[in-house]
Amino acid sequence: MRLKIATLNLIAGCLLIGCNLKTDQTTFSNTDPEDTTTEESTTSKNFKLIALGDSYTIGQSVCETCRFPAQLKDSLQTYYTALDTFNLQIIARTGWTTSNLKNAIASAEPQTDFDLVTLLIGVNNQYQNKPFSLYETEFIELITTAISLVGNDASKLIVVSIPDYAYTPFGQGRNPENISAQLELYNSYAQTYCKNNDLKYVNITDITQEGLTNPLLVASDNLHPSELAYTKFVERILPLALDILE
């Protein structure tokens, strides 16, 4: 009799243990650390972009969504979900020199947590016959300021070359050979500085140098880049921007 009772107790104990093991396995399955489907489907990313410059950044003579910073923002959005957001701030105005841009940034006091910053500046230094030494000094200062706006992460800065307005109807009446030569000096300085300091630099000048053979690249004012030209700018900037954000 005692043997039968012991046997029954043993069976009951095994059944109880078996039930507990089954319960534990079910719980473990429900808390699988690799099951992130719900988290991935509800997580959104919020990106902040800032563009610094002059008429080529604000998009003189083209619509607000046609200028290159806006086109860049829209192009980036296509690589992300509808839940992800891109906020763009622009500090730029037609006619601004490096000095004007420096002062404007100081006055605007932008935040310093942007995910990407672009800088395109210098054409008005050339157009207004400012000393080249001024550009040499203030370009570096603007580089430093731009980097500070992305948390002092220099890898998040993209410097864009200066368009060559000699290849426009406006520029053709103002000693175009001299314009091109001077702008080449500006762009060469900026490109060399970026190379020596491991900064991203995008050359778009050659696109604008097709303005006479392809008038569609010039805006209606016969001076500034058109929407199409800015689209071509973005085609070159976009891969670098994607690398930065990813």
Image: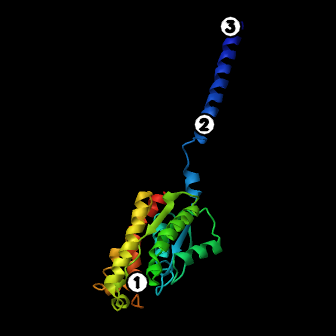
* Location of mark 2 (residue): 28
Task: Say whether residue 149 is left or right of residue 213.
Answer: right
Q: Which residue is mark 1?
A: 226
Identify which residue is drawn at 60% across, 41% down. Answer: 30
Could you say where residue 70 lies in the image, as x and y percent from the top left?
A: 50, 75
**Compared to 184, does 151 lie above or below?**
above
Q: Which residue is mark 3?
A: 3
Q: Position of residue 173 (x, y in %)?
A: 34, 92
Q: Label 1 is placed on what type of residue?
A: Ser
Identify which residue, 207 or 3, lies in the foreground.
207
Quarter holding the N terminus is top right
Note whether residue 105 is visible: yes
What SS does tag 3 mark?
Answer: helix
Local SS, label 1: loop
Which mark's residue is nearer the viewer, 3 or 1? 1
Mark 2 nearby-residue class (10 Å; few <14, some 14–19, many ≥20):
few
Give yes or no for contact between labels 3 and 1 (Cβ–Cβ under 8 Å). no
The one nearer the camera, 211 or 125, is 125
